[in-house]
Amino acid sequence: MSAYEELDRDRRPGPETIALLKEVTAQVTRTHSFPPRGYPRWTDEAVDEFVGRMFETGRADKMITGCFMRSVDQQSLERLLLTSIGNALKDEAKATPIGKLRRRLKTLLKADERFVSVPPKQYGGDAWTLPSSAGFWSGHPDELDQLTRNVDVEPIETLPASGPTPGTAKASLVELSYAALLRVAAAVLAQTLARFLAARFYLDTPAVLTGGADSETIDATPDSDVADLADDILAELTPRQRQLLGMGDDRASIMNQFGDDGADDFESAVRILRTYRQTELGHEAILEVLRRCGEEHND
């Protein structure tokens, strides 16, 4: 019995549905970099914990019910769960200290003319560089730490969970970011830069709420990077490619309705998506593209 048949019969998640949810979660997490706290990477145990927590909070039941109501068979149920799990993981990522620090850095560095923001499309993710630099640096955050060990900045005791960055903390984050980019002389993904700074200042644990006075506020649109990259990807797709992606991976229906030309168009669209899947931001943008195409197809 499939998960779809189980839900159609019992109207609630059973063993087959739970197994499918774990399978889909594992599939999404292959390109996701935020395992649950206490796990250095995504493992079977980390997937079990994530799924278990979703059931404990009631989110899993709502997600499964919503996906089942919109599906027509096992394949469509799997596609809808894939998108929903991706969105759930994205929401968790934004709530992590790393995600919050990345958004804080975006506000701070945008206000400093020494830094240049690199569009997500260029390197598969939002990045920062200096006017004098060239190329892309793809090293590990620990390498940035080693390269900047001799840079003396004030320690950061705490950061506010939201709102302005205290002056001393602002100076430390900006100057260490500048030092790191200066030493690699290339563009660095914003996610890599945030991980480096979080480890350096021991900010990769939940922040303690504090006061602070400064002029800037954290970017109020945390989804903007994903939405912007999704817009860029959609601009590369033809109307028919968007229609085909909205049909999901239903090759038989594509062949029946559009023939060999439709199948070729679908494969071309998939190749475009694959060029963006190497980073977390790219993966999130692909999920957003598939969600929009699916909505267009169902309208």
Image: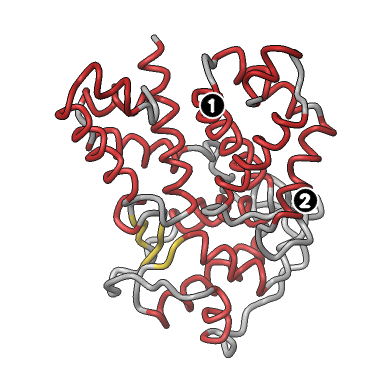
Which residue lies under the disc numbered 1? 80
Name the residue beneath numbered marker 2: 211
Residue type pointed to by label 2: Gly
User: In the shown orientation, is residue 215 left or right of residue 276?
Assistant: right
Placement of the C terminus among the 4 image quadrants: top left
Q: Which mark is residue 112?
A: none
Residue 140 horizontal/vertical position (percent): 52, 75
Name the residue type under label 1: Leu
Residue 204: image location, x then y, percent: 71, 62
Foreground disc of the pair 2, 1: 1
Q: Residues within 10 Å of mark 2 (few under 14, many from 20)?
A: some
The answer to whether residue 233 is left or right of residue 24 is: left
Residue 12: x percent and y percent? Answer: 76, 18
Secondary structure, mark 2, is loop
Locate the N terminus by quadrant: top right
Q: How is the image coloured?
A: secondary structure
Q: Is 21 situated above or below 69? A: below
Name above or below for residue 19 compared with residue 27.
above
Left or right of 274: which side holds 212? Answer: right
Task: Place residue 65 in its image quadrant.
Answer: top right
Q: Residues within 10 Å of mark 1 (few under 14, many from 20)?
A: many
Q: Residue furthest bottom?
A: 150
Residue occupying image coordinates x 41% and y 40% = 286
- Which residue: 34% across, 59% down? 123
Q: Position of residue 46 (x, y in %)?
A: 73, 53
Q: CA distance from mark 2 to mark 1?
A: 42 Å
Nearest to the observer: residue 281 or residue 253: 253
First in residue order: circle 2 vs circle 1: 1
Q: Using the rendered view, name the quadrant where residue 232 is placed.
A: top left
